[in-house]
Image: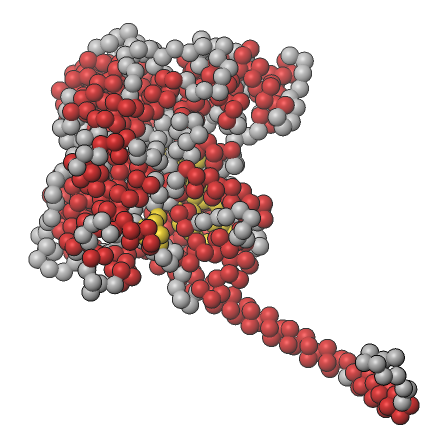
Amino acid sequence: MGLFGSRWQFDTASFTAGAALGALLTALVVSRRAGMLRTFGALRAQWAAWREILATGTAQSYSRDLVRWAQTCHLAGPLFLLDEILVPPTVLRAPARSDPLQEAESDLPQVLPFTPDWPQLGALYGWPQAPLEVVVRGRQHVVLCGRPGSGRTVALAAIVLGLRAGKLAAFIERKDLPTSLLLAHAADLEPAPGKTPTIDVLVQAMRPHCSRRTLPGLPAFVQRGLTGEAPWLLLDGFDELSDAHALRVREWLGVLLRQSPRLRIIVADGFRGLPLWEMMGFTCAAVAPWADSKHEAFVGRWVDRWKKHIAGASASAEWPSLDILRGWLSVPAALTSPLEITLRLWSACAGDALGKTSSSDLDALVRRQCEPAWVPGLKQLAGTMVAAGVAVLSRADGERALSSATGIETRPAVDISAVSAELIARGIWRATLAGRLAFAHPSIAGRLAAHHLARSERVGSTDALLALPSTAFTEVALSLAGDVLDLGPLTRDRLTTSSESPPTSSGTDTTLRLVPWVREANALLECAAWLRNAGEAEWRSDVLRRLAGVVRNERWPSPLRARCACALVASLDPGILVLFRQMLEAADDAEGQVLGALGLGALRDGGAIAGLDDLLDSANREVRWAAARGLGRMARKEAAEALGRTLLTGEEDARRAASVGLSFDREEGYPILREAATDSDALVRRTSIGGLAQVNEPWVVDVLRKVSRDDKEWVVRTAAATALEATPEGPPPAKPADAADLPWLVAFAAARGSGVPSGAGAMAVLERALAEGNPRERLAAAEAWRQAAFPERMRVLKQSLADPDAAVRDASFEGLWALARLPMIR
């Protein structure tokens, strides 16, 4: 039976006709096979060509989008393109790790510990810096660290512009040049494990920076880019994420790196999550504060562009006056951030300054760039973000937040989407995903949120202040709120012990709880960041007193004392001059004398010149060098004369210190150094080379070349030639070597008849070195333990806080200090 109940019947004629037709078609295909294959090949080639055209078009369009973002992503984007006013960013060069098998490369004393999270004093006194080109070398993942306003976004933009213009190609090996350059804001990454493909998350986050021409081909472009030879991903704004969001994004990045092992990531973040990045294999490159020369260059470029681009009565041949602005911005550049300098310049040129602090300059910015009716709603929106600990709100959440305030949502004739576009164009908001709202900079949101919190406090909601989440976004708001909001309840809540009590450590403490005084010190420095904009607040004196207590107490670790000294200097409180002068007289505390000398020099206290001059003859080498640098920073004729006398008549080491001190004084010190290079005394000529080597001016090269060629003493010629050959850039940031690959640890184990196993087994040998090694081996071991995973690092470094050697204790403290900022530790 057939399928439908009928019987099958064989039809010979039909079968024969079908077979003949099949044979004919087969013969036709076989005979035409070569032509058909060529046709199919041509079709495939045509399709590939169309795909290439589409991908190339997307790549070119996205390249233009990147340049557009880079030129306008800075605070003054509504006024100028970035490359019109750009001061090339630099990064702080971390000191080399200790190696017991090698002697130190330089015999110059390190008068300050390396504290990149509080870099004010170190940057003023010549911490080594490297250009941004050093960061982009190789394929190492990098975290550009810094505080909000330090210039991390501009550094990413400079990388984009440098790569597109070919300026960075000379510094990168051909094989490491990026085959594709991708950009996203970290707050736009919304990974949902198990639900959304990893690459789709990146595509979505890249959309806000893309034009309509780019969007259709973006998924294929990203897919193709991630499978290329050397793709790069730039992530901005990671410090704006909440702790939970940051954890999800880091997990997503781990998956992405496993899927695209050739991908290189450069991310802009704060110091809060640095240990987590280090555990993922990233290295830190801290953005350096501006030197005075960069400060002056920026002011000059700003004034030139203002006169060229800004029309109206505020721009004329006489105004802005470069000399007047430089005098008004007389605070040393390292004590202010690029953001603060930009805000101050803009207010000065626009003639609408409301005060002398960055908080008042932010108020002027909002007043200048926003319609008055928008401001109440923006304050409500920013306050909602800070209270929730997020940097981005959905449109629905934003509308609910705005419903309780008079602002943009109450104007029936205004379309919110149109207002959003206008706020983006005016630099108040940034472009983000559709249906979401985000401020262009945390400081803008922070200042608006401060006003919102102040209003809440006035209506009796002080508890809301104590309930704020502990996030970097919240800390920005608090640092800008001191003049409108009483932060006393917060300082009393965070600071519960006295800084006068010396720290105690137990060598037998094996718990995984953070040492209480380390946590308390971290809280103190968080509060110290609020001082600059606090005006005459009552709580200010308590924080200053606690900072002074740490700085004056030699029982506290050196890195912590240095951080507190930086905080005191950055506060610009006039009362700290008395403290630093008293510290100069404490002969039994050499470290205190060092901090006092550097602090007085940073604040240019002319009344301390005599005291610093006396310290040039100190028996302690670090004190001599600190006094010389402090005098050089004074930028006063009397200080330069004191250094000049020491250069001519002092002991050799004091002469070297005086030479370096003179290198900080452009007006008085440079001429003395230039004259000393041709002095009749060979010792004067040789010691002057050290100071000239610190000066970054074109004429120095000519002087050193002449000395290296013409001086009659070979020792002077050699010193000049060595200074000429020095490479200030240094190597690119690199991931620290694993414990099993440390030569000194292998030698340590071999001396005890054992080896160093690979992997986790090496940590047992490293722990033994920390317990049994000589001081240099224990120091190297403590530094290596700072790269270990959290639980073991906590246990081992807590015990080494009781080491008899101060350098080992300081290195152990640094490892614990990084952990103190982690959200899961707090």
Q: Quadrant of the C terminus?
A: top left
Residue 407 found in image quarter:
bottom left
Residue in view at x 23 percent, y 14 percent: 583
**Is residue 258 shown above or below 517?**
below
Residue 340: where, in percent of width, then height? Answer: 23, 41
Of residues 649 and 659, the one drawn nearer to the viewer in this rendering: 659
User: Image height check: is 287 above or below 589?
Assistant: below
Which residue sits at x=85%, y=84%? 6
Instruction: Note whether residue 426 is visible.
Output: yes
In which quadrant of the rendered image does the N terminus lie? bottom right
Q: Nearer the viewer, residue 411 or 629?
A: 411
Tell me which residue sits at (26%, 38%) in the image. 477
Residue 295, given in percent of the width and then of the height, sits at 24, 41
Residue at image point 31% right, 44% down:
385
Left or right? Give the position of 125 relative to 818.
left
From what the image shows, is residue 44 above or below residue 307? Answer: below
